[in-house]
Amino acid sequence: MSLSFGILVFPQIQQLDLTGPYEVFASVPDSAVHLVWKDGEPVRSATGLPFVPTATFDTCPPLDVLCIPGGSGVNALLEDEAVLDFVRRRAGEVRYLTSVCTGALVLGAAGLLQGRKATTHWYAHDFLARFGAVPVQDRVVRDGTLITAGGVTSGIDFGLAVVAELLGREEAETVQLALEYAPAPPFDAGTPAEASAAVVERAKKRLAGSRAAREAILARIA
């Protein structure tokens, strides 16, 4: 069965939010993965990696899955009606509407999280309730045809979960093994609960600028 995946790409995207699930989806036989944006001009990630969209809002084919990644560039999307209109239109057509990291906030701004269980990056989790979502602290959260993932690296777990939903556990495990996805991080600092207080504060300071800008936007729209 041929599957069509669409991943929104945009300026200042968190590249691993996109490339993690992209690699999983693209590893499924007979799949097509489209990088979708307003136009075909290249965009740069928050860390400078360039991406070239392969479809525009007007040329994007029918999709089985639409995924909204996160990153500091999400802030601009929260008030971008062209983006929000595209997401709303496709939300009613896809089999699964999904997000990684702060991409969930775009779903919220589009009015698609009301009363739904969802997750996002740990330092944006408190924003979910402003959109009427039911916040859940988990790596991958399913609520019917809505699947959301936590921060950044959870996009790989999320991608495998989506493949399992579509094609079954055996196919998802086959992709996992082909990618040799067997995470064993050298430190236990991947969540605020595991990291030391000092590390949590360092991380918050590093993310403070984007969060402050997001706070100002949400004060206007949510």
Image: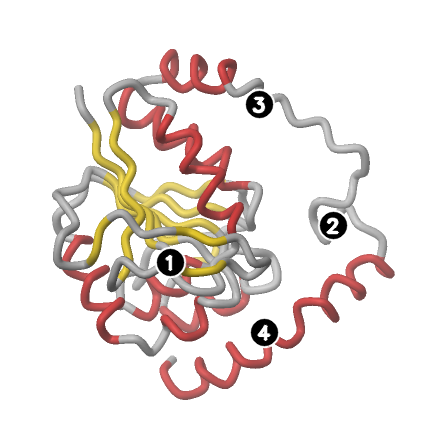
Name the residue rendered at 12%, 47% in the picture. 93
Residue denoted by label 4 = 211
Tag nearer the camera, 1 or 4:
1
Q: Residues within 10 Å of mark 4 (few under 14, many from 20)?
A: some
Q: Is residue 215 left or right of residue 142?
A: right
Q: Secondary structure at mark 2?
A: loop
Determine contact: label 2, label 3, CB under 8 Å: no
Residue denoted by label 1 = 42
Place of residue 174 in the rendered image (x, y in percent of width and height, measured from the top left): 43, 13
Between the residue at mark 2 and the residue at mark 1, the CA separation in whole angstroms equals 38 Å
Residue denoted by label 3 = 181
Q: Earlier in the sequence, mark 1 or mark 3?
A: 1
Name the residue rendered at 32%, 61% in the picture. 41
Determine contact: label 2, label 1, CB under 8 Å: no
Q: Secondary structure at mark 3?
A: loop
Q: Is residue 75 above or below residue 147?
A: below
Tag nearer the camera, 1 or 3:
1
- Which amino acid does the dot numbered 1 rest on? Pro
Number of labels in the image equals 4
Tag nearer the camera, 2 or 1:
1
Label disc, if present, on residue 180 of the rendered structure = none
Q: Is residue 22 above or below residue 196?
A: above
Q: Secondary structure at mark 4?
A: helix
- Which amino acid does the dot numbered 3 rest on? Tyr
Q: Nearer the viewer, residue 79 or 26?
A: 26
Q: Earlier in the sequence, mark 1 or mark 4?
A: 1
Between the residue at mark 2 and the residue at mark 3, the CA separation in whole angstroms equals 23 Å
Tag nearer the camera, 2 or 3:
3
Residue denoted by label 2 = 193
Between the residue at mark 4 and the residue at mark 2, the CA separation in whole angstroms equals 20 Å
- Which amino acid does the dot numbered 4 rest on? Arg
Q: Earlier in the sequence, mark 2 or mark 1?
A: 1
